[in-house]
Image: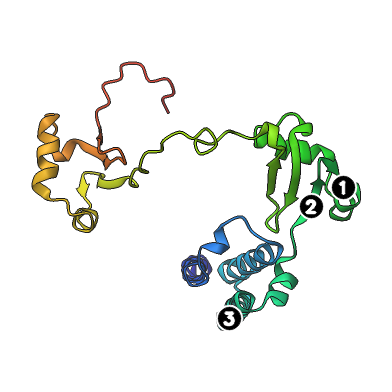
Amino acid sequence: MVEIGEVVIRTVVAFSFLIIAARFLGKQVISQMTIFDFIAAITLGGLTAGLAYNTSIQPHNTVVAFIMFVVIIFLIAVLSTRNRKIRKIFAGDPTIVIQNGKILEENMRKMRYTLDYLNQQLREKDIFNINEVLFAIIETNGSLTVQKKPQFRNVTRQELMLATNEEPKLPIELIMDSEVIDKNLVENDLTQSWLNAELQKRNVDMKDVFYAVLLGNGIVYIDTYKDHILSPIDKE
């Protein structure tokens, strides 16, 4: 029973360390990862798992190793932002797999990248005809970037010489889980009385609002807890 309690405590501590490390290292850790990011994430996960369940290992040894890995990862990230050569060592270079409409088989072979996977990634970009592709590049995080041939590209308003309207603002969240987000109101020069007036227009009480957001076009979208849907399409 004592050992179970120790495992519980170690697990909580390990999870806390992992959260702190992720916040310290930044969003890059949870984005589409390069090879270095992948190795770093796997290593940190392995160390925290060991700290959680392996009671034969002294906790302070695992904590020291964990901190050392976080420091190493952080230093490499800092150096990578300042030195292109170091960045290339750890992140690698993008690889061209289609150039001027021609598939570069040798580049694909070096990466062990198959035609099936190439076609899959092209379909994910709504490209079902490989003849439409001028350039295709495998980025360092494994994603595929594609430039279509000119005749297959979408026409822009500039090319058609059409007038363009001012871009709308980003949506502003006003209420989440019946709680007003005061910070967003203050930052966008909105008042509580204005919000109350918007709710009164729809005969909605604050406690009934699940989510409210001011859209970029100036319309306030409000979702209440009661959806008044008699037959939900997908009910858990």
Decide: is 32 above or below 26. above
Q: Do the residues labelled 2 and 1 touch (CB within 8 Å)?
A: yes
Q: Distance between the residues labelled 2 and 3?
A: 34 Å
| Residue 1 percent across, percent down from the top left | 49, 65
**Given the current orientation, which residue lies at the most extreme front position?**
161
- Which circle, 1 or 3, is nearer the viewer? 1
| Residue 119 percent across, percent down from the top left | 77, 36
- The residue labelled by disc 2 is 96
Residue at 74% x, 50% y is 137
Residue type marked 2: Ile
Q: Total label count?
A: 3
Residue at 58% x, 78% y is 78
Q: Distance between the residues labelled 1 and 3?
A: 39 Å
Residue at 81% x, 37% y is 116
The image quarter in which residue 43 lies: bottom right
- The residue labelled by disc 1 is 104
| Residue 46 percent across, percent down from the top left | 64, 66
Crowdedness near tag 2: few (<14), some (14–19) or many (≥20) residues, C-alpha within 10 Å: some
- The residue labelled by disc 3 is 71
| Residue 208 percent across, percent down from the top left | 18, 36
- The first of marks 2 and 1 along the sequence is 2
Q: How far apart are marks 2 and 1 (CA)?
A: 7 Å
Secondary structure category for the residue under label 2: strand
- The first of marks 1 and 3 along the sequence is 3
Secondary structure category for the residue under label 3: helix
Residue at 69% x, 32% y is 151
- The first of marks 2 and 3 along the sequence is 3
Crowdedness near tag 1: few (<14), some (14–19) or many (≥20) residues, C-alpha within 10 Å: some
